[in-house]
């Protein structure tokens, strides 16, 4: 199985900051990497797929990059509604696996 | 508008069974592959099962293989998860999730149904 390691597990930031979250796969997954946002009590929402493609309607302050084993989610100019937990997921092979999550908290 | 509505969760004793259902609407259900994903209280996301459009291709996480069975009824726009021999570790919120067309990312999720396994 492909293990997904996310870091950091939590980050404190202020509105307007730039936050970077990394995700490392235990083996190459080409660009089959997705990022999800989850707010408390809500279902996850897909933000980015194929490592760098924004889902329609997702603000452009979100961006993704990487391929192979190392990936990054960047949130530029953090907004109040961005405080949430973010998960990466490899979609290269079964079993699909998620990273452990990164909680973005208000400083 | 895409909607996924899960039902069937509840409290069950260890060793018991439950059948979860997911009613889909707002899209051509038979054209999309589907998944079940769960989240234990306060924990991360765990993908547990996938089913292709024609039910011929099915996959499970090792944690549920042999105990859970995914199925779908395209005539009823419904997805199911039969869960047998439930354990305390299966306690979680169970989400039904639709894949993007031709891909394995989940672009729509239901609100989940809670399964609690306890004596």
Image (cartoon, rainbow, N blue to C red):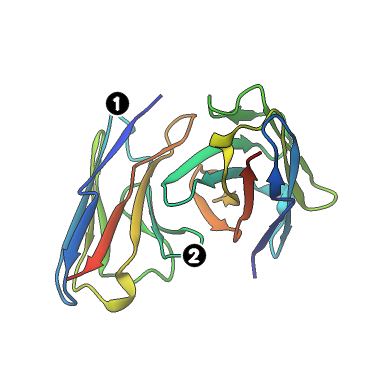
Describe the element under mark 1 as helix, strand or loop: loop
- Camera-near label (1 vs 2) is 2
Q: Which chain is indicated by disc 1?
A: A
Label 2: how many residues lie within 10 Å, few (<14), some (14-19) or many (20+)?
few
Left or right: residue A62 compared with residue B88: left
Query: Image quadrant for the C terminus of chain B?
Result: top right
Left or right: residue B42 compared with residue A104: right
Describe the element under mark 2 as helix, strand or loop: loop
Whether pointer 1 and pointer 2 mark residues with C-beta atoms closer than 8 Å, the reply is no
Residue at (26, 62) in percent of width and height: A104
Q: Earlier in the sequence, mark 1 or mark 2?
A: 1
Left or right: residue B63 compared with residue A62: right
Name the residue furthest front.
B119
Position in image of residue B91 (x %, y %)? 57, 42
Q: Which chain is indicated by disc 2?
A: A
Identify which residue, B10 or A31, lies in the foreground.
B10
Residue holding disc 2 = A41
Q: CA distance from mark 1 to mark 2?
A: 32 Å
Residue at (49, 65) in percent of width and height: A41
Residue at (64, 47) in percent of width and height: B115
**In terms of image quadrants, where is residue A82?**
bottom left
Can residue B94 be spotted in the picture?
Answer: yes
Name the residue furthest right.
B75
Residue holding disc 1 = A27
Label 1: how many residues lie within 10 Å, few (<14), some (14-19) or many (20+)?
few
Left or right: residue B48 compared with residue A101: right
Position in image of residue A45 (x %, y %)? 46, 60
């Amino acid at each position: 199985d492909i293990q997904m390691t996310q870091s950091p597990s939590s980050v404190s930031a202020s509105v307007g900051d730039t936050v970077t979250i990394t995700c490392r796969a235990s083996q190459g997954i080409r660009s089959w990497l997705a990022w999800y946002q989850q707010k408390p009590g809500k279902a996850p929402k897909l933000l980015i797929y194929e490592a760098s493609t924004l889902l329609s309607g997702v603000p452009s302050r979100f961006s993704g990059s990487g391929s192979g084993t190392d990936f990054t989610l960047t949130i530029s100019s953090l907004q109040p509604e961005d405080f949430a937990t973010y998960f990466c997921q490899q979609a290269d092979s079964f079993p699909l696996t998620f990273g452990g999550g990164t909680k973005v908290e208000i400083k | 508008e895409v909607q996924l509505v899960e039902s069937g969760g509840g409290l069950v004793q260890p060793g018991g069974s439950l059948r979860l259902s997911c009613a889909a609407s707002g899209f051509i259900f038979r054209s999309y592959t589907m998944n079940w994903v769960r989240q234990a209280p306060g924990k991360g996301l765990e993908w547990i099962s996938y089913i292709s459009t024609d039910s011929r291709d099915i996959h499970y996480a090792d944690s549920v293989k042999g105990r859970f069975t995914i199925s779908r009824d395209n005539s009823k726009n419904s997805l199911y998860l039969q869960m047998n021999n439930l354990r305390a570790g299966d306690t979680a919120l169970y989400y039904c999730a639709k894949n993007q067309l031709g891909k394995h990312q989940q672009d729509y999720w239901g609100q989940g149904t809670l399964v609690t396994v306890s004596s």
